[in-house]
Amino acid sequence: MLTGTQILIVGGDSRQLQVIKKLSELNATLCITGFESLKESFSGVQKVKMSLELFKQSRIVILPAGGTDMSGGVESTFSTNELKLTADVFESIPNDGMIISGAANAYLKNYCEMYKIKLVELFARDDVAILNSIPTAEGAIMMAIQNTDITIHGSTNVVLGLGRIGLTLARTLKGLGAKVKVGVREPDLFARAYETGLTPFYIEELHNHVQDADILFNTIPALVVTKNVISNMERSTLIIDVASKPGGTDFLFAEKYGIKAILAPGLPGIVAPRTAGRIIADAISQMLI
């Protein structure tokens, strides 16, 4: 139980509702800010306006999956008010304080380091990332179905990257009867792809493996789907890029060339917010208890 633990939740989307519910059930002293339009109520949870006093009283601060922007702004689906973590906010957090976020950019990392605040990036944890790969894969395939006029079964798919998302995505496509080629950089991943029954190739040879692709999925957060690669594709090929912004695709050239390319980061929160929220809530509660 978290009885007596003061926790502040700042902004977020519907995934945060699962976090609020879980922590409330564990009897945490819970305040939420940036939820003015939230109609759902939770026992023992206080809706409050953002203030420095709030942060002074809270040893644990929970941010949305995306953390902050580069000016400290925090997004919230349930508020039109500005939520911003300024230097004063970080300074007011207790010395033994902790900020929990899905991801963290340089702004958040720098201020946490400056004020000696422990920063936990949930999406950097293997357990969270692997579980999140499931709704990411399902969401990417859903987008492929919505944006093509063919079945996944029998289609030729290229998956770039065999990390936590790439492996789940490639396995799921294969399970649906697709032909799956996987682009990797390391020999051990090449071997793993082969062992899994996929068709591996090295990223350096990508331009030679896209001519017959119906769908290309990119999970690599670096520019790998270049002009050279795109110009070797059929114009009917669909590109779905699930890497974090700005993705790994030359979207401008793809548009000029006549190929549809979709940047789709953050799919868990879009296609399965309840499941994604439970993953985050379980990880936070396990960490705090």
Image (tube, rainbow, N blue to C red):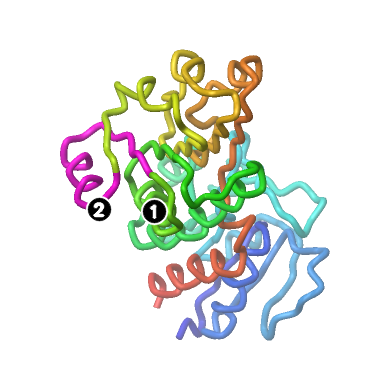
Query: Which residue type does callout 2 highlight?
Result: Thr
Quadrant (top left/top right/bottom left/bottom right) for the N terminus = bottom left
270 displayed left or right of 162: right
In the rendered view, tell whether residue 166 sits above or below residue 286. Answer: above
User: Could you say which is closer to the camera, residue 186 or residue 214?
Assistant: 214
The residues colored magenta run 180-198
CA distance for labels 2 and 1: 10 Å
In the rendered view, tell whether residue 261 sits above or below residue 242. Answer: above
Crowding at label 2, few (<14), some or many (≥20) Cα neighbours within 10 Å? few
Q: Secondary structure at mark 2?
A: loop
In the rendered view, tell whether residue 224 sits above or below residue 65. Answer: above
Query: Which residue type does callout 1 highlight?
Result: Lys
Q: Position of residue 273 (x, y in %)?
A: 62, 63
Mark linked to residue 108:
none
Q: Position of residue 87 (x, y in %)?
A: 58, 41
| Residue 183 inside the magenta-drawn segment | yes
Residue 38, picture quadrant: bottom right
Mark linked to residue 174:
1
Residue at the (46%, 59%) spot, across then down: 132
Count of numbered marks: 2
Residue 271, picture quadrant: bottom right
Mark 2 and mark 1 in contact? Answer it, CB < 8 Å. Answer: yes
Q: Which residue is mark 2?
A: 196
67 displayed left or right of 217: right
